[in-house]
Image (cartoon, rainbow, N blue to C red):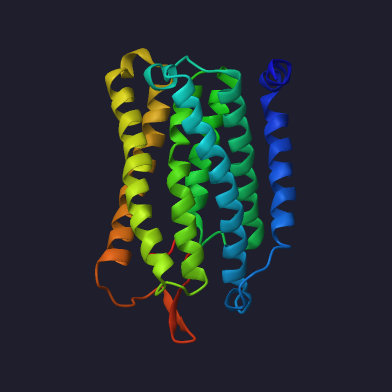
Amino acid sequence: MEALVALVKSHPGPWVLLFAALFKLLHGLLRKLPTPKVVLRNDFQLWKWRNLSMSIVHSLLTGTWAISSALIWPETISDIHRHHTSLSYLLVCISTGYFVEDAFDIIHSGYSLASWEFLLHHALVISSFLYTLYTHLYVAAAVITLFVEVNSVTLHMRLLLKVAGATSSTIYDVVKVINICTFVVFRLTAHFYLSWYLACNYSKLENANFFACCLTIMNIMILVYFYRLIRSDFLRHTGRSGHAAQNGKLVSKKFLTD
């Protein structure tokens, strides 16, 4: 393992592309899994289903890995600037490969405009993670950032259920509650901690301006989406522009549905 990670550290760029290719291969294999008939009626919904299915696989892998790293090595939390292990570095490299693959999938699908929020998020993550991989700094910070993938599991499950038209089901009611809980515990808390750490150590950290900018943009996006979730799942609302009726149901024209 140490020899492999040493090789990855010496040339992280090509390894990111290799992991992106592996995720692309896995993405293709997931296409062979059964798909709900209601999803097959709409090309955009079909693409969303396949993209979200791939996202859940990534979230299960990296979310579990990130939490485990923090539990085994508490320094991940206390020293986000310089601490890292071989496994945490490899985690960041693998995850960067996924975000590269997912960005390519969004662009190649032709739905970039509908998915611009995802592309902006991916651009911020990829640039930050590449800096981490090449400098070996802030690896622990990247691991903490990946805590949000625990929430991404329920977040994407929620979106899959919406794509399948199952928002009136009991499982959706359960998922939406768990999703809000994991959103607060893993997404909001992780970003709050990183923002607090950056503010307290701003003068001591390399390229603090860049990371402050990235964190600020992502924090705004997270808070906006949190509001959308509360409004959509727990407050009464009616259809608005940006939605079209399909088979008596509201179908979002955006990737990030309310």
Q: Tell me the quarter of the picture where residue 46 sits.
A: bottom right
Give x and y (percent) for residue 99: 58, 43
Give x and y (percent) for residue 228: 32, 60
Residue 240's place in the image compared with 74, above or below, is: below
Q: Is residue 195 left or right of residue 142?
A: left
Which corner quadrant holds the C terminus? bottom left
The reply to whether residue 225 is in sight is: no
Q: Tell me the quarter of the picture where residue 76 sits.
A: top left
Give x and y (percent) for residue 120: 48, 47
Q: Residue at x 58, y 45 (%)?
A: 58
Instruction: Give the residue furthest to the left.
Output: 235
**Residue nearest the observer in this picture, 183 or 258:** 183
**Residue nearest the observer in this picture, 151 or 224:** 151
Q: Is residue 210 left or right of residue 29?
A: left
Residue 25's place in the image compared with 15, above or below, is: below
Q: Residue at x 32, y 53 (%)?
A: 226
Give x and y (percent) for residue 122: 52, 44
